[in-house]
Amino acid sequence: MTPADNFFVLVDWGTSSFRGWLMSPDGAVLAESRGGEGMLHCAAAGTGGTGFAAVLGDHLARLGAAVGTPVLICGMAGARQGWVEAPYIKTPTRLEALHERAIRVDAPGDIRILPGIAQARAEAPDVMRGEETQLLGVTDLGYTGLVCIPGTHSKWVRIDDGRVVAFSTYMTGELFSTIGQHSILTHALDPANPSPADGAAFREGLARALAEPTALTASLFRLRAAQLLGFEQRTDGSARLSGLLIGSELADAARQYAPLRSVRLIAAGALGRLYAAALGQHGFEVTQVDAEQASRLGLAKAAGRLWGAKA
């Protein structure tokens, strides 16, 4: 196998994870390699990008990629504290043009990192890095609509004729973790014996947040008070907290992006099921796409425009 065969490698490099795929010229996945060597690991492993270069080299060997095979990367490897900063593109921006702003790494071979997107508005500053590639993967040329990407920092994105025109980030996942581990609600959760994540407690918390979106902090304290007074069980704490936080996110997103009621949900697993249930309960029409597949498809589209590969 030689670089002239038009094989290429795609990499989704997160804060704490690495996922790579060796692709054939027709866009088929030939091999994959994954690990926990995310941006934080690589930045600590060496200065001047040596940590990133070593990790990529190890994964390329596992993939069986020939020397000189082109590599396209998205995610935190392009952050300011990453391998090489790939500066943000400012909204509004066309998704199919992401490859034009890819930064080439000063290393042997052709290694490029896709940029993130910034909403450079003083009244609503926001940034994304990695999600833009998922958006490219799940949208077609000329797409208009709303996309939701749940996670530690959930994204809601409005796309108009293939351009990202506005987006909002919600710290829903991070708040769930922080509140559950470092607040009074630590005593309100029972991680060892939780009730179903999408059960009655989740739906009740979701409904309360949607009905009273400005009362979130009061609703959070009532979660604990209800248990102390015998109205609720500690086993329902995690699900109710999840419902309250996701409901608060949905209420604000629905307000911002009304009257759009159709959404593409980029998510998988338990989190995907929770958001699909929440969106459906709030009256959204949902089309769900696997998050990892969205990243790979977006990278493949960009690689096709860079090197003529088929996405």
Image (tube, rainbow, N blue to C red):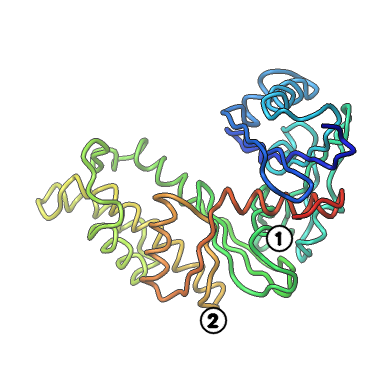
Q: Amino acid at mark 1?
A: Ala
Q: Could you tell me which quadrant the C terminus lies in?
A: bottom right
Q: Is residue 70 left or right of residue 167?
A: right
Left or right relative to 293: residue 286: left
Q: Residue at x 58, y 48 (%)?
A: 292
Q: Residue at x 83, y 37 (%)?
A: 70
**What residue lies at 50% left-to-right and 63% top-to-bottom?**
288
Of all residues, the one furthest to the left in this rendering is 230
Among numbered discs 1 and 2, the one appearing first in the sequence? 1
Q: Which label lies toward us, 1 or 2? A: 2
Mark on residue 259? Answer: 2
Instruction: Give the percent coordinates (x, y) of residue 243.
Output: 34, 58
Q: Position of residue 86 (x, y in %)?
A: 80, 43
Which residue appears at 24% of the width and 52% of the height? 223
Residue at which label 1 appears: 122
Q: Quadrant of residue 240?
A: bottom left
Secondary structure of the residue carrying tag 2 is loop
Q: Is residue 300 above or below residue 50?
A: below
Q: Secondary structure at mark 1?
A: loop
Is 189 displayed left or right of 7 in the figure?
left
